Image (cartoon, helix red, strand yellow):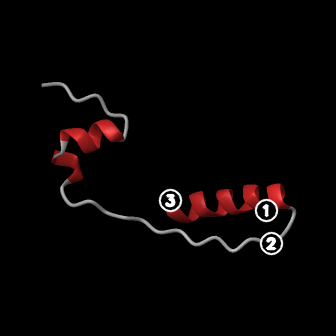
């Protein structure tokens, strides 16, 4: 999925700047993010008690 996101973003940026672009992406993994109410809310999930 990261490759698809990067390819699409690179193509859109290249259209914007009308030239070649090298795009480097990084993914940060937060341990136990699924158990964190605030992290889930950050991603747009509604957490019900």
- Mark 1 surroundings within 10 Å by alpha-carbon count, few (fewer than 14), some (14 through 19), many (20 or more): few
SS category of the residue bearing label 2: loop
SS category of the residue bearing label 3: loop
In the rendered structure, the answer to whether residue 17 lies left or right of residue 46 reads right
Query: Which of disc 1 and disc 3 is earlier in sequence?
Result: 3
Reply above or below: 11 against 41. below
**x 79%, y 62%: residue:** 14
Query: Which of disc 2 and disc 1 is earlier in sequence?
Result: 1
Quarter-of-image position of residue 32:
bottom left
Residue 43, percent from left and from top: 36, 41
**x 82%, y 60%: residue:** 17
Q: For residue 31, which numbered disc appears in the image?
A: none
> Mark 1 and 2 residues: CB-CB less than 8 Å, in contact?
yes
Query: Which of disc 2 and disc 3 is earlier in sequence?
Result: 3
Q: For residue 14, which numbered disc appears in the image?
A: 1
Quarter-of-image position of residue 24:
bottom right
**x 18%, y 45%: residue:** 36
SS category of the residue bearing label 1: helix
Q: Nearer the viewer, mark 3 or mark 1?
A: 1
Q: Which residue is mark 3?
A: 1
For the residues marked 3 and 2, what is the alpha-carbon distance in whole angstroms?
22 Å
Q: Nearer the viewer, mark 3 or mark 2?
A: 2
Q: Residue furthest right?
A: 18
**On the rendered image, what quadrant is the C terminus found in?**
top left
For the residues marked 1 and 2, what is the alpha-carbon distance in whole angstroms?
6 Å
Q: For residue 20, which numbered disc appears in the image?
A: 2
In the rendered structure, the answer to whether residue 24 lies left or right of residue 13 reads left
Q: Nearer the viewer, residue 39 or 34?
A: 39
Residue 3, percent from left and from top: 56, 65
For the residues marked 3 and 1, what is the alpha-carbon distance in whole angstroms?
20 Å
**x 80%, y 72%: residue:** 20
> Mark 3 and 1 residues: CB-CB less than 8 Å, in contact?
no
């Amino acid at each position: 999925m990261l490759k698809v996101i990067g390819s699409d973003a690179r193509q859109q940026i290249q259209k914007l700047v009308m030239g070649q672009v090298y795009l480097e992406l990084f993914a940060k993994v937060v341990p136990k993010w699924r158990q964190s109410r605030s992290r889930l809310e950050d991603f747009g999930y509604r957490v019900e008690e």
